[in-house]
Structures are given as C-alpha cells and as structure tokens.
C-alpha cells in the first residue's frame, strides 16, 4: 500500500546520483544531434534526404517504444523496484549501439549507409529508451513536494548539460580539433563514439546504484489483470492524453523540440560555412551556451518562488527563439560584425551564454510541471503512471534529433547544398545557398516557437491547485490504508 504522503525532502546523495544519470543522455543527445547528420551527409556523402529519412525511421520506432517502455516500467515488479532493472540492463547495449552508429564499414555505397544508419539509430534510441524513460519516471516518484521537484529536475538538467558539454568539448576540442584533421576526417568518429560509450555505461550504473535506497519511497505498480504489453501501453497512453494539462505541454514541447532539432542538425554547417569559425571558435561558442545552461540551473527555484513554473517555460522558449533569430537576420541585413573578426566571436559568445541561461528556465520548469501532472492524473484516475507520461515526453525530446534531422536533411537537399569532404570553406558554397541556409536555420525555424508559446499558455495547473490535489490524495490514501 502506498504511503498517504510522499511530501519529503530527498537526500542530497540520491539527488546527486539521479542527476548523474542524465549525464549519459547529455552525451548521447549532443553526440547524436551535433555530429550525426554532418558525419553521414558531409563526410560520408550520403544525401541529406536519405540521412534524415533514416533518422526519421528511428523516430517512428520511438513513437512505439517510448510509451511502451513507460508502460512496462509502470507495471513491472521486482525486488529492485519497477525502474532500476531497466536502468541496469540498458547501459552496455546503449554503448555498443552508439559505437556502431559512428563505425559503418567502408565501401557500403549510399543505400548501404542508409541501411546502416537506420539500424543503428533504431538500436541506439531503443537502448536509450529502456534507460531514460524509467529514469525520468524515477525522478517524479521520489517526492511529491512542489519545490523539491524543481530541485530534483535542476540536478538532472545540470548533469544533462554537463554531459552535453563533455560531448562537445572532447569532440570539438580534441577528436575533431583542427590539429587532428577537423570535422571532415572520417577516422576521428569511431574513437569519439567509443569514448562517449564508456562514459555512458559508467554514469548509468552509478545512477542506478546510487538511487537504490530510494526504492522503499517509490510508488508500487497497481494490481491489474495481466494483458498484452502493447494493449496495456495503448490503454495507458489513452489515459495519459485524457489529461488536458499534459496534452498542452506535450504538443507545445514537441513543436519546439523539433525546431530545435533542425537547428541542432544544421549547427555545424552554420559554424563551418555561414560564420566561418575555426574549431577553437566553435568550441568557445559551445562552452558559452553550456556555461549559460549550467548557471541557469541556480536561477529556477528562486524564479518559481516569484512567478510560476508556466512562466519559466514561456520565458525560456521565447528567449530561445529570439536569440536564434537575431544573429541570422542581422547578418543578412548587414547589421552584424563581419566574419573573421573577434567582435563577431565575442558577440555570438555573449548571445549564446544568455540564450542558455534563460533557456534552462524552460527545461527545468517543464520537467517539474510534468511531475505535478502525474499527481493530477492520480487525482483524476486513481492510478500513478509516471512512466507513460515521461515515455511520451522522452519521445518528444527525441524528435529533436529524429524529425529535426529529417527536416534538416531535406532542407539541405532543397537548397542544393554541396556535400563531400572536399567542401571545406564558404568559398566552396554558392552565395545564395549560404543565404538560404541562414534563412532555414533562423527565421523559418524560430517562427514555430509561437505555436509552442500558445500551447503553453493553456496550462492551468497552478501551485495552489497542486496543493489542493495533494491534500485530497493524502485523504484517499489514508482511507485506503485503514480499510
């Protein structure tokens, strides 16, 4: 029987171990999102449409596996709880699949590369799903405290950002540094993937081991008749989408994640050809964004005390769009510093820093809001289903690199982007093609943030309403434990 309340402060060691688990996802997301399209399209010569199509196929698998993993972990029973077995089991398969993703055999041809990318993208995403969805659900289960949930998500975001930082720093700063052949040297990619894979295994197992002591405080799966897992997943998904708060958040974040994915897929193209940065300058920009994201973690809890979680999401999303739009538009209007100047580098470094600082408010606020929705869902349905909710959110976040790469790849073909490792500088690109790249990266993508902001504005679960829901849930649990 579940305790009448789980409104508790979680030990620092548990929050730390939980947060470290997000390091692996940060590694995978940045390694995948920043380099995969560039590697297959620009380095190996696979067409943008086929490369994006392969990643879109993987995303379609995620549409099933993400909610399925959530439903399975919601209903799983073992002496290690319902989340931890999945976390332990997924680590090594994830590392092996990620290494294979960046290690296709030579001489495969275009369709062979397409098949290889499709298979290993599916395997990588599937293994990450088995870990990431139960891990997210675990964070929502550890406490029902409104403010403590924000702190837990802050730990998660801090280490997720740190993982992304590590993937970018060792990538641009070592494996793909100009002194080692740069981003166009095919032999640099397999060792890079191996290094990230090892770190994924270590941090996933660390997180699972470090949070085992939380198992007594976690929710137990409901007593249900055994049925086909797919049937169970479909039923659970229907219940999740019956929640109005969840629907508005899901579709809002899905749109903005897809648009962010397009930008992420085109980042290296913009840095290498549009802005004409060196590898060292690219690294500075990545670090500026990362430092902003890391410092932004410490602003969210005070912000929530003064405003609301919904305000944090609106603020972060709007700032992301503005900072994405301004540099490109100003450059196309000749209002921005010239390429090759230190003023340009410093200007973009400052903008990337503030973009990350404010964007983090959306990330943390969103994760905390999702945990609150699981309480509202229990209030409405009588069942706790953190897994199915966070499975849907995991799918939306994967749309960042899945559908984002698909759209980005098609966009590259539409603007007739030249591909091949011999395309080294902006001088090898027609001027109008560079302009079209900037328009796709900036104004076209940023405009979709308006839809996300509209969706978020419909979220109505306030702190006061959440406190009322928790009071009612405590009364129900106390009545249930006394019968």
Image (cartoon, grey):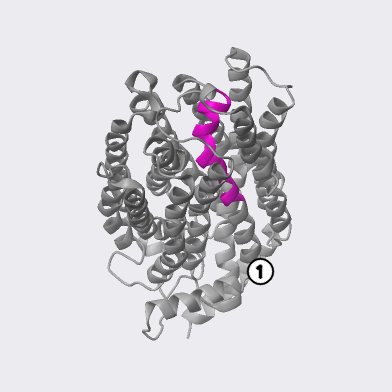
Badge 1 density bin: few <14, some 14–19, many ≥20, Cα 10 Å: some
Position of residue 287 relative to residue 77, above or below, is: above
Could you tell me which secondary element the residue under label 1 belongs to?
Answer: helix
Residue range corresponding to the magenta coloring: 256-276
Could you tell whether 290 is left or right of 255 in the image? left
| Residue drawn where x is 62% and y is 71% of the image | 243
Q: Is residue 259 magenta?
A: yes
Q: Can residue 288 be seen by looking at this rendering? A: no
* Residue 277 rendering spot, x and y as whole percentages: 52, 21
Could you tell whether 12 is left or right of 241 in the image? left
The foreground one among 444 and 200 is 444
Circle 1 residue: 244
* Figure quadrant of residue 456: bottom right
* Residue 203 rendering spot, x and y as whole percentages: 32, 44
* Residue 174 rendering spot, x and y as whole percentages: 35, 25
* Residue 289 rendering spot, x and y as whole percentages: 54, 31
Q: Is residue 16 magenta?
A: no
Q: Can residue 468 be seen by looking at this rendering? A: yes
Position of residue 197 relative to residue 480, above or below, is: above
Position of residue 459 relative to residue 316, above or below, is: below
| Tag count | 1
The foreground one among 431 and 235 is 431
| Residue drawn where x is 32% and y is 22% of the image | 180
| Residue drawn where x is 73% and y is 61% of the image | 458
Majority SS type along the magenta span: helix
């Amino acid at each position: 029987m579940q305790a009448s309340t789980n409104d508790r402060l979680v030990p620092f060691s548990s929050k730390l171990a939980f947060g470290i688990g997000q390091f692996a996802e940060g590694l995978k997301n940045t390694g995948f999102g920043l380099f995969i399209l560039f590697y297959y399209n620009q380095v190996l010569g696979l067409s943008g449409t086929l490369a994006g199509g392969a990643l879109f196929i993987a995303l379609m698998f995620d549409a099933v596996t993400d909610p399925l993993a959530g439903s399975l972990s919601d209903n799983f029973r073992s002496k290690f709880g319902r989340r931890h077995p999945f976390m332990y089991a997924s680590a090594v398969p994830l590392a092996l699949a990620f290494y294979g993703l960046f290690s296709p055999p030579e001489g495969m041809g275009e369709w062979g590369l397409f098949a290889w990318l499709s298979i290993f993208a599916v395997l990588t995403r599937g293994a990450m799903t088995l870990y990431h969805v139960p891990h997210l659900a675990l964070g929502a289960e550890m406490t029902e405290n409104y403010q403590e949930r924000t702190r837990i998500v802050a730990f998660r975001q801090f280490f997720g950002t740190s993982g992304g930082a590590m993937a970018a720093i060792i990538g641009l700063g070592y494996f793909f540094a100009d002194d080692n052949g740069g981003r166009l040297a095919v032999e640099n990619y397999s060792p890079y993937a191996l290094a990230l894979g090892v770190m994924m295994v270590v941090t996933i197992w660390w997180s699972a081991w470090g949070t085992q002591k939380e198992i007594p405080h976690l929710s137990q799966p409901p007593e249900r008749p055994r049925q086909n897992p797919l049937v169970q997943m479909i039923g659970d998904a229907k219940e999740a989408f019956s929640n109005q708060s969840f629907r508005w958040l899901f579709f809002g974040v899905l749109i903005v994640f897809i648009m962010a994915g397009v930008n992420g897929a085109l980042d290296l193209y913009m840095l290498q050809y549009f802005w004409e940065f060196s590898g060292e300058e690219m690294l500075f920009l990545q670090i500026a964004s990362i430092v902003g994201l890391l410092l932004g973690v410490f602003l969210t809890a005070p912000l929530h005390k003064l405003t609301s979680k919904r305000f944090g999401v609106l603020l972060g999303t709007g700032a992301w769009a503005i900072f994405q739009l301004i540099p490109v538009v100003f450059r196309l209007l000749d209002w921005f510093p010239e390429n090759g100047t230190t003023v340009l580098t410093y200007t973009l470094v400052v903008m990337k820093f503030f973009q990350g600082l404010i964007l983090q408010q959306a990330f943390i606020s969103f994760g905390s809001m999702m945990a609150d929705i699981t309480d509202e869902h229990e209030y409405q349905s009588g069942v706790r289903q953190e897994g199915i909710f966070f499975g849907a959110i995991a799918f939306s976040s994967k749309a960042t690199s899945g559908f984002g790469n698909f759209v980005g790849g098609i966009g590259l073909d539409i603007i007739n982007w030249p591909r091949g490792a011999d395309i080294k500088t902006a001088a090898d690109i027609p001027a109008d093609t560079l302009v079209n790249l900037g328009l796709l990266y900036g104004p076209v993508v940023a405009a979709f943030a308006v839809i996300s902001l509209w969706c978020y504005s419909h979220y109505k679960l306030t702190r006061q309403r959440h406190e009322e829901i928790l009071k009612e849930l405590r009364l129900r649990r106390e009545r249930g434990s006394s019968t």
